[in-house]
Every structure is written in structure tokens, then in C-alpha cells.
Amino acid sequence: MATRSGPRSVKRRSRPGKRSVYFFGDGHARGHAGMRNLLGGKGANLAEMTRLEVPVPAGFTLSTEVCREFDRRGGKLPQRVREEVLAGLRRVEKVMGGRFGDRREPLLVSVRSGARVSMPGMMDSVLNLGLNDETVEGLAERSGDARFAFDSYRRFVQMYGNVVLDIPLEKFEAKLEARKQARGVEQDTELDAADLKALVNVYKQLVSACTGKPFPDRAEDQLWGAIAAVFRSWDTARAVTYRKLYGIPDEWGTAVSVQAMVFGNLGDDSATGVAFTRDPSTGEKRFFGEYLPTAQGEDVVAGIRTPHPISRASRKRGDPPSLEQAMPDCYRQLLRVARLLERHYRDMQDLEFTIQHGKLWLLQTRTGKRTARAAVKVAVDLVRERLIDRETAVRRVEPESLDQLLHPTLDRSSAPPPIGRGLPASPGAACGRVVFTADAAEESARRGEEVILVRPETSPEDIHGMHAAQGVLTALGGMTSHAAVVARGMGKCCVTGCMKLVVDSERGVAQLDGVEFHEGDVITLDGSSGFIFKGKVPTVEPELSREFQQLMRWADGIRRLRVRANADTPTDAALARSFGAEGIGLCRTEHMFFPPERILAVRRMILADTMEERTAALQQILPMQRDDFFGILRAMDRLPVTIRLLDPPLHEFLPHTEEEMATLAHDLGLSDETLRRKIEGLREFNPMLGQRGCRLGIVHPEIYEVQVRALFEAACACAAEGMRPRPEIMIPLVAHVEELRILKALVDTTAREVMRERRQRVRYSVGTMIEVPRAALTAERVAAVADFFSFGTNDLTQMTLALSRDDAGRFIPTYISRGILKDDPFVTLDLEGVGELIRIGVRKGRAARPGLKIGLCGEHGGDPRSIAFCDAMGLDYVSCSPFRVPIARLAAAQATLEAGPAG
Amino acid sequence: MATRSGPRSVKRRSRPGKRSVYFFGDGHARGHAGMRNLLGGKGANLAEMTRLEVPVPAGFTLSTEVCREFDRRGGKLPQRVREEVLAGLRRVEKVMGGRFGDRREPLLVSVRSGARVSMPGMMDSVLNLGLNDETVEGLAERSGDARFAFDSYRRFVQMYGNVVLDIPLEKFEAKLEARKQARGVEQDTELDAADLKALVNVYKQLVSACTGKPFPDRAEDQLWGAIAAVFRSWDTARAVTYRKLYGIPDEWGTAVSVQAMVFGNLGDDSATGVAFTRDPSTGEKRFFGEYLPTAQGEDVVAGIRTPHPISRASRKRGDPPSLEQAMPDCYRQLLRVARLLERHYRDMQDLEFTIQHGKLWLLQTRTGKRTARAAVKVAVDLVRERLIDRETAVRRVEPESLDQLLHPTLDRSSAPPPIGRGLPASPGAACGRVVFTADAAEESARRGEEVILVRPETSPEDIHGMHAAQGVLTALGGMTSHAAVVARGMGKCCVTGCMKLVVDSERGVAQLDGVEFHEGDVITLDGSSGFIFKGKVPTVEPELSREFQQLMRWADGIRRLRVRANADTPTDAALARSFGAEGIGLCRTEHMFFPPERILAVRRMILADTMEERTAALQQILPMQRDDFFGILRAMDRLPVTIRLLDPPLHEFLPHTEEEMATLAHDLGLSDETLRRKIEGLREFNPMLGQRGCRLGIVHPEIYEVQVRALFEAACACAAEGMRPRPEIMIPLVAHVEELRILKALVDTTAREVMRERRQRVRYSVGTMIEVPRAALTAERVAAVADFFSFGTNDLTQMTLALSRDDAGRFIPTYISRGILKDDPFVTLDLEGVGELIRIGVRKGRAARPGLKIGLCGEHGGDPRSIAFCDAMGLDYVSCSPFRVPIARLAAAQATLEAGPAG
């Protein structure tokens, strides 16, 4: 999508005459939408909108290259850039009327950040820049509204003080509160011009007290300060966190757009708002948005006032009048612009607008964030509307986001009456213990607890907590508040604007309509309805939309990689097939050993002293395994089912508690002491590197023999009923081809025996997990015996990184915070290390046996980035948990599209 | 040395006219010494000796290709070969006189195996072939000695029955005993011709009873049977075991030599013996050997009769007369032949001879097996005698064998009086618990116990037990008995021919001159003197001979690879340097943490709750570490010393017993319960893959900081005293270059700080272990930061093979017995797997940083085959335990020679 900018050294050598500042206004613009990398999303779109003759206040954009240059020069703007900025200002003055810093006709500007991709709330902006004790008078005169002028001035000093000069907002708010108290009023709007003027002076005193310098009065000084602050804000902790979370490179930098101010707070014929060209929650094609009369843009996004609906259709009983009702002309013009922009960009747009004295100005357009449900519907609808093709639709949906469509929602039929309702800001259901701070959320999540983060409102400082929580509930904020936008992006359930909720984070208590919650109490959220429930509410399986099925069919038509599921039971197998799995890539037979009615036989088998005792215990297990296999093979009739023979160290099956020990000792007729000694004898120092996997099969061939017999008896029974079972027997933990050779012979012998007994023929193959580095390194030898390979990337990651999944918790947090690990290697394949082994394994394996079938069956089989790698490596399939099958199907299709036309 | 034979398909296409049988005799031979691969060592040398006009009985050799053809044809000789054999027989008859199977002038032959390399006792032979009820009469007439003829006939039937027809020897021996008892005699020699004739019939009845067929009377049938038996014997279990032990490929096959018999048991003017051109124990240049008058060759080797000395010089008081005294002419001729052969082959020879009616015949010559001490002396002496050059001398000594020169010998000064004496068959000292069977020896060794195998005599069936034991003691057999030859080859201490020893393996008891031993009693052997001691006797360090030092200097002049030692203490460092170590390749700092006076501070450090507590505990440890480092750096002045920072999981340092726990709880002022919880909290599921190595340094930088500070304080102190310390700091368990980057910065900062404080400059470097597969796979990134690499092949083997060294014992025996593993991968590098990672690591590392210094510091650093690989990979050095340094020096030189002239 984006071309990468060249290395630093090249840029430094770039012509000194190269442009740094890009003007837009009055239907003309130097930039355009294709210059996103240089102008940021916001700047590029402002230029593009201007070219489209959408009413956009004039301005100019300092490019992202300037950001890097600024950084290199230790926070200084080169003279050349300063000159271009001043030239740009002159041109804005000409288009918009007024002059920057001029007493009589003051031009005010906003200074905003804009990175290559949208980072909502993460970057700082300064509005109303250009105001000082002189220009404020001009503004008052020109607008005929002194209160507006001083309110703007007050907001500016506060914002500048906070954003540019790093003074905490609370300090300004305290002064504001004090003034309101002194005046005996409750609302800001009740303060008059004189109050606000006095407040400006109080603010300025605060600034000089905090910084030791007077507040900058010259408009130009303000501008340089604000531009520098925006560039600096690229490196604030919260911006860095966001980038880390979303994998955005630090070197991209931000652009700065300086734009003439227009005012939504200029009286009753002014307003400000945001709008989506479609419903960002459902994807429905209906104009959707919110606005606030007599407000500046920040008021809507910050969630301090709950906004009004934009259209009559979306207005609910009791809501204030919609924009469509209050300003029908502006609404119609907005609708026209929205349609134009959506058709132009061929995607759902998220617009910011301001109405100043009845004139509509567009401040921004960008691709609208949406829920997975909306993403699917919008993508499919846009194909139907012939705006995009199927490939584009498939590319448009983030595979990972499908997760929210596939997980259960609340079972409303058995839900208790809700105790409250907020805005359905991000769909899905979530249940967990209440926490009141982001840190508490993160801490609980680390302990494995599911929590709901409850906040008055959220801010970028809360992102890590939102990430850790199952769901988010806020008292303030609308459908486009910070909490809502971020939660939708994360695919988290979120309810916002629950006005009756009173949150006291300090005391760790919240009240909702008389019901009190304490930290640790369980609540349930329904992000699709906005309802809030006390306690845990049961859930129902999701029903997948027609659009979802359509998109999946398109994806299936595109992808090269096959998708199987990891499933150990007939139920899971059926579920996986319903999600589109094309077989089972990993059936872990050990999971069949754990049910309470079987475990005794298993323990008897493990603790047997002689092969006879062991065989007798295995005979008890055989019919149970056979029934399981039968169910699985039936559920996957005609599709391949990869059965992995017993893998874990045997002592995993042994009892751990005193009580279990006593029961087992009694069952086996052993003394406690004897049993304890036997169990102790099986203990291993490093079970992960001990007697497990095929080593069990080599040392105790009778175990594998019984498993293979059970499998083939089941397969023959399927065949007898007219099914076409396709078992693939997989030998785990092979490090040396000889292990595979010996065990393949065992499988073949047993299979032939059973098929002869049952007079059936079953097509089968015998292959191996590649999960020991040595197997990958000697793949050419292993492939000489294996019918197929399946990379077991969980273990392969453990061995390659020398990282025990069970023990890594002690240092992984440090590793992530210090940036040593970018991703959890058990979630996203470590491409440099484990990926290199896969590359070697595939190359050597296929060199020895051209066309060798190769799959992957670790957790990574459901991770889109890992799937892209598997596709690039030419694997035949990935296998993942049933719920991730649709994600994998979509990710595989995207990988095919990324790779370009097939050869 | 040997060219490999081509693939099977090529051989099958070889011309049908190709020769299979190679004649030798009367100064003419088709073969020669260079045809070892085709004719086996024995056949090639018989041909060569014949060409040298050494008196050798005529014969012919069936080539090893026939062995493979025999095998392919399922145990049948092709007609072409049969015809060539018969033609060969005719020629032998012509040269030697007599006719095969002829009643009047019977020619008898021996049929012997002969592989490419000598496999003593492993292959079967048949002597006196051609005897039957008719020819025996001819032999009796011709020799004028009916007793001799029937004794030969008896021996032949017994040997043929055993070797060709698989009848246990005991059955024949029982018949012999019965006959002796019936005749009331004790010695075989007391039986007369009639007895023996009767015995032949008894034997024949035994054969038909066992096989269901009559004994083959036709000489030609006997010959075909014997040839087939020799070929078949290539695949007996004991031959397979020997090959596995010595790494001899199964496909080499054996040749068969058929040779006219000569007789050493034809009366007082006949004898048989073996001789070495130099002393195989010491290497001294003195003719050395043993003989038995009136005996066949098997009698000497089998150790049933204790032989007489060959020369007057080696005769001890009470010995029977030497050959030099008894048959001075033959002795002089033998001496001449021996000198001729040694000069011809340019190496010490091991000869077999027979004297028949005063005429000397040589039956075999081969390179003599020798002790390490002898190998070194012979090699150096041969250079001085200008028979070989230095390179050849260096090639001649098996590096592994030096082990026996480097280990302690008995401290005779503090030894108690010995309880007995045998022959000093293989030097060195050994101490252990008595076991009476090879199986018991193997079993005890598996439990880690040191044992002495005590046997009446040994046979090839005992090889696995000899391998497992520390030393071997036999009641029977001479210096060239099976036990002696095999033990010398293995470098095991061995005492043979201890005539006063009576061994009752059944009852598990032995008596030596009135002292009784039971299984489990400790005894000590001195293989250099032959003395046997009750209990454990103290030992002294070995003194290295001048020849040894000379050979090492030559090796040093040849080798490319440097050799360092693994040493953790000043004492070990000094020892290593005395053995020629060129630095320390691995100093494990954790070993400094274990002494009782330090461990409390270490435990305090580990269990600290705050960084302050931890730092305080570390401050206690610092001066101790500094002293250690000072001692090590001083011992290795001017040589590089690689210090590995703390590596093992911290819980390894914690107490394990109840008592230690209580003490520690008291010391730390904690309750037992609290301490237990803390320790439990540090427990890991897979410590090998847990928080260890550089992960400790990342999470607890203060630990590494203190270690680095201690090191640099010590290095500065050395520098202040005028030394030139060369510390190399090595970061363990790096998986990701970022780990190294962070910790290198920590080392650099601390080093600069200390050097500034002490006003000293110390040259140092910072590198990393490559012991995690990921580090090897991403070596190009790691090399960007590392000053050097050191392959830690112990851990690399564990990770690459997913094999915990501590847990592998449960399945490794099965793996070795099933042939899955050829060598213990912790002893000899797994070249296919781990070797491949090393290859990748070296290639990528040097690509990123040309000339990157790379070493290896696992146990493999002292293993000759692994060293050859390291040399081929272009590593800069290997590091091994001090005692293996000379082995590594020699192995490195041999690797250089193998690789050919340097580019």
C-alpha cells in the first residue's frame, strides 16, 4: 500500500530546494490522497478534499520528512522550513481573509498532527492558535461575540499550556472550577466574557508560575511552539505504546497540518460534529453521526458532553433534535459531501465537520474504523455497489477481527433484567470482575483473570488497560468517544455513555441506578445492545451473517493454502467443519486419556511393571479410543484427519494431589509409599526434553500399537458404513529419521493386520511432526520416510528459542518492555529464528521428496501474520483451533493476494 | 587411507571375468599390501610377505567382493568363484606338495577371515581342514606321528563343528573331559592316538545328533562349508558389536584366506608363537613375543596355556626356556624377518609364526596394537630412525588413547602390599567394585559405578563388559590374550594371567592366594606392573615422557586449530596450561558460587525481595569472585580467558535437604514456611528452558554487574603487577541479538568505570555462547554485536535434539541398542543436526563479520571426531577439560593433515 521512504542518508542528501510545506485551499492543493506517507493521512486527505472542491478551511501541511529532520536536528526547524511556513500563512490569509496575529482581522489556526495511519487520540493538537490580548479583541469585534472570543482564548491558553508547555490539565480545570464557584455557577457556559477574560489572566499566571516564562504572546512564537510540540508528541509514551501495540514503525514520523480555524461555538447557527458514511457498528448503509451545537470539535470526541444524533432516523425518543432537523440545509450539504467522499475513496468515511454561522466546513475525512461485523458488511455491500472488486473486499477485513463475530453473545432469553444501559459502542459480550484502573486491569489479566474496565471516560493513557480487559464500560462519551473508537479497533466489547453510572476510582466503587459495585464484583456487558448486567450471564453461539458467508466464499475462491482445524473430539470436529475446516490437522490423542472414567486405566498402563500388565491396561483403553476415532472420522468423512500418537510425558497423567494418590494406590492395590516411589521414578528434570513423543513409542511400542489398532478399527468401521475415512498418522517429536522408520513400520504392520481382520481397505499415510530443530535440519533424511510433514511450531518455538512456555512468564514481561521481543513468539511465529528452520525444513524436505505435503499445526496456524509466512513458504495447509478457522481462511486469501498472481 | 568401494549397482555391472581369488606362494603373489580393501588386511599382507620372500605357506584369498556377492546371493558362491578356488588349490598343492583330500599325501588348509582392518577374535577361522578318516591316516604316515594326526583331526572336527555348524564348544569339551576322566588323566597331552581317534568318532556322533546330518567327510565339501561360514561370520552379533564400537561400516565385508597348514604341534622341534617387533606396552625397541612349543596358533591367542617368553632378555626367573634358547636358528631367522617386515611396513609389526620340524613359517603380519605410551614412543623413534616423517608420526597416534597417559597412576609409596600379581597387559591404574560378568559390568556402569571385570579369561562375548569396566583382571591368558589385546586397544587397564586367581562367576566369588573377593568388593589394579591390591589405592599424577612432549611439539607445529581449556579455578587453569592449553575457552563463574563459605551469600542474593537486599548480598560475593578471577588471570597471563557470566537457573543454588532448609531459614531470619514458599516460587517446569543464562542478566542486571566488576578489578590488579590479562566476557544463552546488545552495554559501562577508578587499561572483548538454535540461525544479526562466538555444544545438543541430558537415560539405551543413535551425541557431535547448525552459524556469522573469532566449548571440544569437524568448519579454537588438552592438540594436528595442505 505505502511505498517506504528511503534510508536516512539518502534523505540527507536530498536537494535543499525540496518542498517541506504543502498548501491546500480554495479548490487548489499541492498534495493529494496518494501522498499519505509524506503528508500524513489527515494532510493528504485535506489536500484531496480541497481538490474535490469539498469546503475545507485553507491551510498547509509540514511533511513527515520535516518531522525526521526536526528530530535529527535535536528539535529545531530548519530556516528553509520556517520560510515556507510563513509563505503558506500568507496564502491562507489570502484565501480565508484575515491576518495571522493581526489585531483587527485576526486569522486563527489549528495545528494538528497527522501520521501515515490514523492514531486516534494519540497525538496532540492545538486550536485557536494566534490569539493574544490584542487579537482576541479583533475576534470579538469581527464575530460580534466577546464571550465566544474570550472563551476561545481561554481554551487556547489551556490547550497550549497543556500540550505545548506540559502543564497538567487539572491545574487549569481547578482555576476554572474556582472561578465558577466564585461566580456561583455550575456550567462553563454560565461564565461571561469578563469572567473568561479574567480567567485568561489567571491561566497565564499559572503558565509563568509553572514554566518560569511568560505565556508567548506573539502569534508566530505560538505557531513555532505548537509545531514543535506536535513533532515532539510523536515520541510521548502513549504514542510509543500505541505504535508498539499496532506495529507502527517509529521512523514514520508525523506530519503537521496548520489550518485556518472555523468555529462551531459561534452561537446557535454553529455546530460541530463527526459522521460516518455508514453505521460503523453494523455496517448498515445509513448516514450516521453525532454533533453538538455551539461546540468545538474536541467536545464531541472527548466525550465530555453527550452529543446529539445527526439524522432524524437515528434519533431516539427523548434525544435532542438531530442536525437534520436543526439545520436541514447544512445536513443536506453534509450528506452530499459524505456521498461524494465515500464514492471517491471507495470506502466508508469518518468525517469531521464544523458549521460556522450556517456554513459547513469539512475538517477531516478518513477511512472509518468499524467493527468486524461492519467491516464484513461494508466490504460485501461495496462489491454489490460495484465500488470495489471481490479481492479488495477480501483485503479490507482484518482477519483477526473476525474473532468477535465468532464468539458467543449473550443469551438474552436467560439474562436477568439489566441494571442499566449505555451506548452500544463495540459489539460482543464480555463478563469479568470490575476493575477501576488500567493498571489494575493489566495486573489482573497477567494473573489470568478476566476483568471489565470501568472508567468515567477513557483516555489514551488507558490503552494498556483496555487491551488487558475483556470489556470496557464508561459513564461519559458517545459512540465516537475515545473508548468507543479504540475498543472497536481492538474488537473489544464496549459500552459508553452510561450516564447513570457514577464512578469513584479512588475508593474503588461505582454506582449504577442505586446498585453498588466494588472492585472484584462480576458484571456482564452486552456491547451490541449497551445493556449492563450484574453477575455472569449465559451466552449463545454466534450466528454468522450472509455477508460473512459471502466474504468467506470469496476468500476460499482466492486462497491457495488449505485450512484445517485442531480438534480432539467429535464435537470439536463437527464445529470445525461448520466453520469451514478442510480436515483435521492435529488430533491430540492424549486428550482422550483424561476423562475421569478412563484415567484409571491410563494410570494402570503407565505404572505397569511388566509388558503384560501394560498390555492389559491398554486393552481397556482401546475401545474408548476406537469410539472417539470413529466419531471424529465420521464428522470429517472424506476429509483428511491427522492423528498424532501419544505425545506428552507419561507422568502428566499421574495424580498430583494427596487424595488422588490415595485413591489410585487403593485402586492399584499398592501401598502409598510404593506408589509414591513409582511416581517419583517417572519424574523428569526437563519433561519437555525428556521421554515423550515418539520416544514413548520406541520404548513402549505397545502403547502406539494399541492407538493405531483403535484408529484402524474405527476407520474400517467407517468404511464398512460407506464412509471414506482418510486418516493420516502423525509421529510426534521425531529428531532422527530412524525413529520415524521404526514407528512407520509399526503403523504399517498394525494397519495391515486390522484391515485384514476387518476385510476393509483404508487409504492412509504416515508422517511426522517437525517440532525438534534436528528434524528440520535433517529434513532431507526425514522426508525419505515421511509421507507428510507438519510443523509443530509450539514445540519448535520452545526448542529453537530455548524457551519453556510454562516458565517464560518470569522474564517475558521484562523482555517485552525492553523491546527484546516484539511479539509473543507463541502467538506470532518468530520468523527470523523458527521461520528460518521452517524454510530449511521445507527446502530440504521437498528437495528429497518433491511435492511433499507440508502443514503447520501449532497455535500459529490461526495467526494471520504467521499464515502469510506459511503461504510464502509454500506450505499446503495450516491447522488451527476451530474458532480461528474463518480467520485463517481470510488470512490465507489475503496472503495469496499479497503474493500476487499465482505462477 | 582406504578408497571407498563404489555403489552396489556399479559392482553388479562389473565384468564377469573379474578375478575373485588371489594366489600367493613360493615368492609369487597376485596381491600386495595395497590391496587391503579387496583382500583384507591378512590376505594383503600374506601376498606382500610372499613377495618379500618371507617364508609363508602358500594359499589364496577370496576377495571382499565375493563376500558381498555371497551376501547378495543369499549365501551362495557363484560357480565362477568355485572354479577359481579349485584352480587355486591345485596351485597350492604344486607349491607345498601333497594333495587336498588325498589319502597318501594329504594337503591340509586353514580357512581364515580377514577384514580391511584387524578385528581380533571377532571373526572365525577353521584349521586343519581337509582331514577325514582317510587323510588322517596319510597325515599320520607322512608325519610319522599318529597322535599328532588324530589330535589335529579331533581339533578340526571340534572347530568345524563349532564354527561352521554352530555347535557349542562346551559340548565338545564335555566329551573330551569325559574321555580324560575315563582314562584317568588330567592333560589333553596325556591322551594317546587311540583315545583321540575314538574321540573323533564321539565328536562326529555329536555333530550328527546336533545337526541331523553326518559330518562332511569330503575335503572339498568341508572347504565350501568353511568359506561360507567365514563369510556368514561377518554378520554374527559379536562382529556387529565390534564394528559398532569401532565405527566400521557393515558393507566392507571380509575376505577369506585359504592357506596350506603348517604345524607347530608336530613334536619338540615344532612350535607356534606371536611376536611384536617392539614392546607393545612401552614401545621400547626390543623384540618381544611369546611362543608355545608343540602347539597350534590358537593355543597362544586363546590364553588357555600360559606361553613362554620368546627372547632370553624378556625371560624372568622361573620362566620356561625362551625360543632364543630353545631354537636359536629359528629365533635368528624370525628376528631377521621381523626387522625386514618392520622396515618394509615402516611400523611396528605383530607377527604370527609356526615352526614345523625346525622350519619357520610366517602366518601373518599386521600393524601391532599397542598402548598409547608405546604408540607415542614408536612413532617418535621411527622418526628418529628416519623410517617415517613427523606428519606420519603425528597421524600414527590415536588422540583418544593419550587419555591413558594423562590419568593418574598408582601411588606405589602409599600402596599396601599387593595381594597378587598377573601380567601387566595394559597400563594405567583402575579401581572399582568387583563384578564377574560382562552384563553385570555394563549394568553397574549404567548406574555410574566404577567396576573391575574379573574373569577366568575373556572372549569376544565380553567386549561390552570390558568397555563398561574401569579395568579387567583375568586368571588365564598371556600378554597377547584376547583380554590383553582388546584392553590395550581400548586404553583400559588390564592384568592377565594371574594364575593364582580362582574365579567362580556362578557363585560370585573369587580367591587369590587365600584372599576371598565377593561381587561388590573394591580392588585396585596396576596395569603397568600387574599388581593387584585389595581396596582403593591412592594415585599420583602422570609424568609425561620426552617422546610425548616431542610428539606434542610436532602436532603443535602442524595444527591450525587452537586449543583452550575449560577451567574454573586457578588450579585447573595452571594444570591446563601445563598440558599446553593456549587460554581458557570456558570459565564457568557459577562454580565459584558453590563453596560452603560462599553459598549463604549466594542464597541471600537469590532470595532477596528488593534490589537493595540483592545488591548487599552481591557485595559480599564480589571480593571472593575477584580473588578467583585474579588467580585465573594470573595463571593464564598473556593468554585469553573467556569468562562466562552466571548461567544456571538460580534455584540450582538453593538447598534441597530439610536440614539445609532449616539452616538457611535460620540464617535468613525467615520461617521455614516462608522460605519453602519462596523456593517453590523459583521452581521451574523445564529449568533448561527457563530463566537462566543471559535472562538472569536481563532481569537482574545487578548480578552481572557485580561479576563484571569483580573481573575488571581483578584484571586491573593483574595489569598493575605488570601482567597482561586478556579477559573475554561471554554472555550465555543468547537467543536474540538484543539480549547481547543490552548486556554488552552493561559490560562496557562497568568495565570503563572500573578501569577509570583503577587507572588501568585492560584489553577485553565481549562475545556470546551460541547454544540456542535461534542464535545460530540468526548468527548474522548476533555477529553484528558479538566480538566472538563460542559454540556451547552441550546445550546446543540438548535444544537441537530436544534431549535433556538429565532425562535421556530412560530411553537412550533403547536408542543405542536399536541403532537409532550411533554415538552418544553428548560425546561426539551430532554432525547431521547440531553440525548443520554450527555450519549455518559460522557461515552467517562470518558473512556479517569477516574473520569473526569462533570457538567451541562443549564437552565435544575434547572429542577427536568433533575436533576434526571444528577444523573443517574453520573454527579458531576448541576448548576442553584440561586432561583432554593434549588429545585435542593431537586431534587438531591430524585434522589439519587430513584436510591437506593449507590454502
Image (tube, coloured by chain):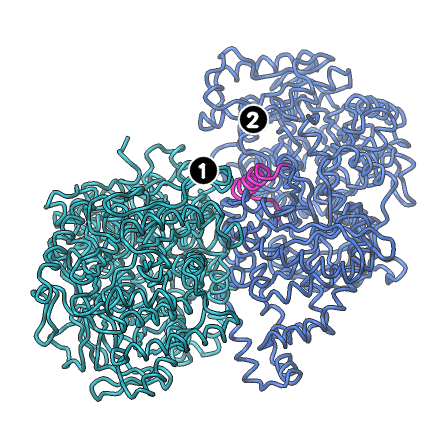
Chain colours: A cyan, B blue
Mark in the foreground, 2 or 1: 1
Judge left or right: residue B278 versus residue A320. right
Q: Nearer the viewer, residue A830 or A661?
A: A830
Say the numbered circle drawn on residue B740: none
Residue A580 at x, y = what percent?
19, 51
Residue A719 visible in the picture: no
Which image quarter holds the N terminus of chain B?
top right
Magenta stretch encompasses residue B89:
no
The disc placed on residue A17 is 1
At x 57%, y 77%, the residue is B609
Q: Specify the quadrant that holds the C terminus of chain B.
A: top right
Q: Which mark is residue B227?
A: 2
Query: Is B106 located above or below residue B470 in the figure?
Result: above
The verdict on residue B836 being magenta is: yes
Q: Which residues are magenta?
A: B827-850
Residue B639: give x, y in percent of width and height: 78, 48
Chain under callout 2? B
